[in-house]
Amino acid sequence: MKIVGMNHFNILTKNLRGTRRFYSEVLGLREGYRPNFDSLGAWFYVGDEPILHISEQAEIPPTGVIDHMAFSGLGLSRTLEDLKMRRIKYELFHQVGSNIWQVFFYDPNGAKIEIDFSPGEPAPAGWVAD
């Protein structure tokens, strides 16, 4: 597994409008393209990078408003093999539209981690699209 950088944080909000206003007006982040997900939300950019994702939720879980932290990685198949070897359960997604590979799992404290891999990474052995 090779992490090559921080990708984004995803926060949860009950107040999407107010949260959008805060991050654009107070922090000066620019709202930009967000894939067409089932839930409402927004992505905020610095330059060309969407560094902050916001997801609207009816209820905020007891774990708080930080839903997950995402890193950029290299070596999708090797990463999956490593997680299996360590007996770390994960979920793998191939994001519609961008074709980015996403691997989600939890650290020992229950923090959700996402590692994003380039669409150019080959599909892992046995991958079957939904």
Image: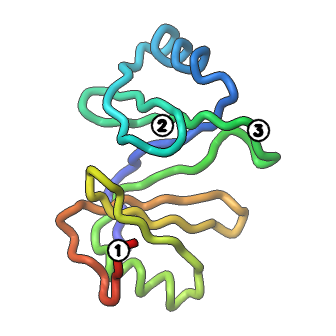
Query: Where residue 43 appears, x then y in whole percent?
Result: 42, 32
Q: How many other residues sit within 10 Å of disc 2, few (<14), some (14-19) or many (≥20)?
A: many
- How far separated are the C-alphas under marks 1 and 2? 25 Å
Q: Please name the residue that numbered disc 1 is placed on.
A: 129
Q: Nearer the viewer, mark 3 or mark 1?
A: 1
Q: Is residue 117 left or right of residue 84?
A: left
Q: Is residue 45 left or right of residue 53?
A: left
Mark identifier at residue 59: 3
Q: Earlier in the sequence, mark 1 or mark 2?
A: 2
Q: Earlier in the sequence, mark 3 or mark 1?
A: 3
Please say if 96 is above or below 83. above
Residue 59, quarter of picture: top right
- Tell me the element at label 3: loop
- How far separated are the C-alphas under marks 3 and 1? 31 Å
- Tell me the element at label 2: strand
Residue 37, quarter of picture: top left
Is the N terminus in the top left, top right, bottom left or bottom right quadrant?
bottom left
Q: Is residue 98 left or right of residue 53?
A: left
Please say if 67 is above or below 129. above
Q: Please name the residue that numbered disc 2 is placed on.
A: 53
Q: How many marks?
A: 3
Residue 112, quarter of picture: bottom right
- Residue type marked 1: Ala
Q: Is residue 96 left or right of residue 15?
A: left
Please say if 125 is above or below 21. below
**CB of mark 3 within 8 Å of CB of mark 2?**
no
